[in-house]
Amino acid sequence: EDLYRLFYVDEHWYLFFRYHQILCERLLRIYRHAQKLSEQEQIEAKSRDQSAAEMLKLRSKLEVSVDDYYPAFLDIVRNLLDGNMDSVQYEDTLREMFGIYAYIAFTLDKVVHNCVRQLQFLVQDEKSCSVKQFFTEEQKNPQSGSKVSHMSCQSVINSEMNYQKKIESLLSDQNIYKMITYKNSCRLTIELLDTQKEEDEDEEMGDEAEAPKWSEFVHKHCTVNEIDQDLKARLAKRPVFLTRNAHILKLRFNVYPTEEVEKKEDSICRKQINETSTLYRRNGLKHAQKSHLKVTKKMYDKFRKYLTKWLKEHMTPADCIDDWLMGEDLKDVRTTIQKEVSHKKPPYHVLYKYKVESESANTQQPAPPH
């Protein structure tokens, strides 16, 4: 039966395990590819001729046999870490050995450096050392780290919960990770613990305790005689604002009715509480309809002056023609102009409409107004 071990860690331990996983994964991929190359070499060695590059001595033949690629690869990595080989020579040697799959090991030295750096953090950081000490003490407990079938036992669960509470008290301001290693299956599972759950439950209990105080506070302010009845009904529903804040805002924006009314440009606008109607200037729409003709003609004349000035500055006399919509070059098509004068309805000026008549189909299609 499979055995397991429980380990609660901090971020330094978590990063170390992650870097270790990356290192082992890349070494495994290189090892499997080296085995694959060795099998191919045994099959193709008899029928393969010497390459032209080796015959012309353009490329030196590797002294390492294909069967020894993986041990040679480990020696190359050690030489790179010791400084006996530069990165360019390291990458070129890997390309000759593993071809396009050499990219897997290009940054292997950086992974090793990160692992060593995390080990330094684990030794120097006090909390990381305490985490390791708690783990060592927990291994002495017979209820911890037993068989997988015993994980659901109540005694094991209680023991692990006590272990977790010790770690939470130690790492109160950090993330906590739950790691479980399985001996026979060689597996490692990682879980980020939700330490905010208990804090949220405490806050909810605090809100429930404050509810009677809030009700007492609302009842106290609703008993004041100066407050309007409508406002009392709103406060009884427990709104999100306080009475004193509402009073300050009313004073700031002059919500309370006053005898003096401020007048500007002979117009008066007042808003009454609990009323949806708005007062505006009398006969304002009627005056706007009367002045619409005058304002429209004024804006049209202003636009025509601007257009005439722009045409003189940017257009040539040849371009300024009025019959460009007539379509005189089209066959079996005739265009006519209809002039309409509208002085009593918008747009209050002469309007030209172009109508296209097709002689072949004997149909008429009005063109857009100009």
Image (cartoon, rainbow, N blue to C red):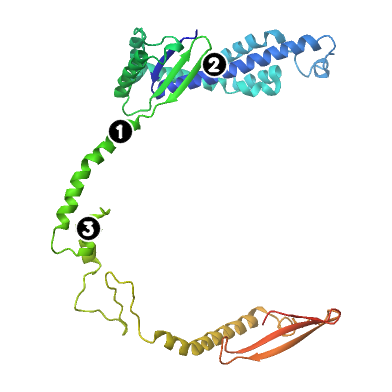
In the image, residue 93 lies at what x, y percent?
Answer: 67, 18
Q: Residue at x 38, y 87 (%)?
A: 283
In front: mark 2 or mark 3? Answer: 3
What is the three-letter code of the residue carrying label 3? Asn
In the image, residue 216 lies at what x, y percent?
Answer: 16, 49
Task: Let me know if residue 227 appears in the view.
Answer: yes
What is the three-letter code of the residue carrying label 1? Glu
Q: Earlier in the sequence, mark 3 or mark 1?
A: 1
Near-viewer residue (220 or 317):
220
In the rendered image, which quarter is residue 364 located in?
A: bottom right
Q: Is residue 78 left or right of residue 92?
A: left
- Residue labelled with disc 1: 199
**Local crowd at mark 2 within 10 Å, few (<14), some, or many (≥20)?**
some
Q: Is residue 136 left or right of residue 57?
A: left
For label 1, the SS is helix
What is the three-letter code of the residue carrying label 2? Leu
Which disc is residue 245 wearing?
Answer: 3
| Callout 2 touching callout 3 (CB < 8 Å) | no
Quadrant in the picture for the C terminus: bottom right
In the rendered image, which quarter is residue 66 located in?
A: top right
Q: Is residue 40 left or right of residue 252?
A: right
Q: Earlier in the sequence, mark 1 or mark 2?
A: 2
Near-viewer residue (257 or 222):
222
In the image, residue 128 lies at what x, y percent?
Answer: 36, 19
Q: Is 64 located above or below residue 230 in the figure?
A: above
Q: What whole-number distance in Å separates the C-alpha atoms at marks 1 and 2?
A: 47 Å
